[in-house]
Image (cartoon, rainbow, N blue to C red):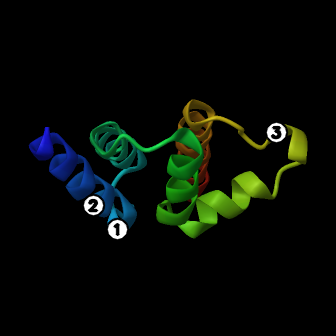
Amino acid sequence: MFSNKSKAADAELKIKMFKQSKKHIADFIIEFKILDIKAETDDMYTIFLVKKNVKTDIIKTILGCSLMSVPEILREWNVVITLVRQGYKSTES
């Protein structure tokens, strides 16, 4: 039991410091989700961490939309982040 708590604490520390940097967004979301599962954090805190750790331009684009389209649950955030990033890629080429 102590080992499980220790693993969850380690995963929580890693998820707090886990930045997207130059990772492809799909890879980042997958790795982030794995850490989230291991850390056993609640969705609201995980959403906070996603917004904090994904590239700022992506989050600004999402939050710049009308309030009705801003995601409310973690799964929606993951989908919207991926879609926004794909949109950036198509406009960059």
Question: Do we see residue 86 in this rendering?
Answer: yes
The label on residue 69 is: 3
Read off the residue under disc 1.
17
Discs 1, 3 touching: Cβ within 8 Å: no
Discs 2, 1 touching: Cβ within 8 Å: yes
User: Of discs 1 and 3, which sits in the foreground?
Assistant: 1
In the image, 73: left or right of 63? left
Question: Do we see residue 89 in this rendering?
Answer: no
**Which residue is at a point 50% across and 58% down the rendered structure image?**
49
Residue 25 placement (x, y as % from top left) = 42, 48
In the image, 19: left or right of 73? left
Residue 75 placement (x, y as % from top left) = 55, 31
Q: Earlier in the sequence, mark 2 or mark 3?
A: 2
Q: What element carries label 3?
A: helix
Residue 12 placement (x, y as % from top left) = 32, 55
Estimate how packed mark 3 is, as few (under 14), some (14 to 19) or many (20 or more) residues with alpha carbons within 10 Å: few
Query: Between residues 65 and 47, which one lies in front from this camera angle?
Result: 47
Q: Is mark 2 on a helix, strand or loop?
A: helix
Query: Between residues 21 and 51, which one lies in front from this camera angle?
Result: 51
Residue 93 placement (x, y as % from top left) = 52, 54
Q: Which of marks 1 and 3 is nearer the N terminus?
A: 1
Amino acid type, mark 3: Ser
Instruction: Give the Cα distance between marks 1 and 3.
Output: 28 Å
Amino acid type, mark 2: Lys
Q: In this view, does 37 lie above or below 47?
A: above
Query: Between residues 28 and 40, which one lies in front from this camera angle?
Result: 40
Q: In which quarter of the image is the N terminus?
A: top left
**Which residue is at a point 57% across and 45% down the rendered structure image?**
81
Read off the residue under disc 2.
14
Instruction: Give the Cα distance between marks 2 and 1.
Output: 5 Å
Q: Is residue 58 above or below residue 84?
A: below
The label on residue 7 is: none
